[in-house]
Structure formats: structure tokens, C-alpha cells
Amino acid sequence: MEVVTVPSHTPKLIPEEPLEKMAEILKVLSHPVRFKIVNILMSGERFVGEFMERLGMKQSLTSQQLSILKSRGVLKSRRNGNFTYYSIKNSGVRNIMASIIENLDDII
């Protein structure tokens, strides 16, 4: 019987609970509009009106996508007067986006 050795650089298996959370984050990011929102937020905090302008979407649709991202723990928000500002809450999401942006030439 042949003995199989596992290379020392084999990645550590992720426990079930964090694995499920990460899969949920990747699912929510898989929507093109939500992915674009997170891409916009890579340069810093934005308010709803800025998303509407950059996405070319109505307020209700923009707010719906922002709400989904916030409910899944991807974004956080803060109010300042009449404006709600959004930013990336999850540093893992920021790292995923940075990696995608950095490797964009390999993806396209």
C-alpha cells in the first residue's frame, strides 16, 4: 500500500459556521448591482444619492440593494441629517474586492 503525504502548504479547513457565513457573503456579492456598489465603496463612504447617480437607478431600487448588503453584514450605515452614508463593514469583503481589482487583467 502506497503512503500518501499531504504537502505542508495545504490550506486549513474552514469550520462550518464561518464557511456558511462566507458563502452567504459571496452569494450576495454575486449580483452585478451589489458588486458594483461594493466596488464604488472601495474608494470610501458614499450616500444614497451618489449611488443613484453612478448606477443610474431610482432611489427605491438603490435602497433595496443597499439594504440587502447591509442585512448580510457587508455594509454599515450612519445617518447625518437627512443623508444616510454607507461604507464597507466587512474587511474580508474589502480584501476580496482588492484581490479581484488587482487581478482584473487575469479575469477578463
Image: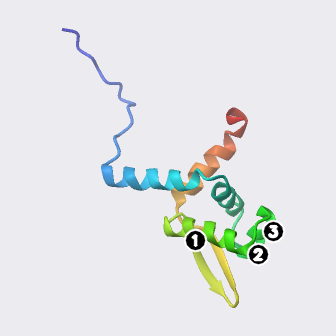
State left or right for residue 70 relative to residue 102. left
Rendered image quadrant of residue 86: bottom right
Q: CA distance from mark 2 to mark 3?
A: 6 Å
Q: Residue at label 2?
A: 49
Looking at the picture, which amino acid does disc 1 mark?
Answer: Ser
> Which sits earlier in the primary sequence, circle 1 or circle 2?
2
Which image quarter holds the C terminus?
Answer: top right
Task: First in sequence, mark 3 or 1: give its number.
Answer: 3
Disc 3 is placed on an element classified as: helix
The kind of secondary structure element at disc 1 is helix
Residue for point 72% across, 74% down = 59
Measured from the top left, where is residue 100 in percent x and y? 64, 44
Residue underneath mark 1: 67
- Calculate the distance from the C-alpha at mark 3 to the C-alpha at mark 1: 18 Å
Location of residue 84 with respect to 53 vertically, above or below: below
Which residue appears at 62% of the width and 51% of the height?
A: 97
User: Which residue is painted at 71% across and 61% down in the image?
Assistant: 40
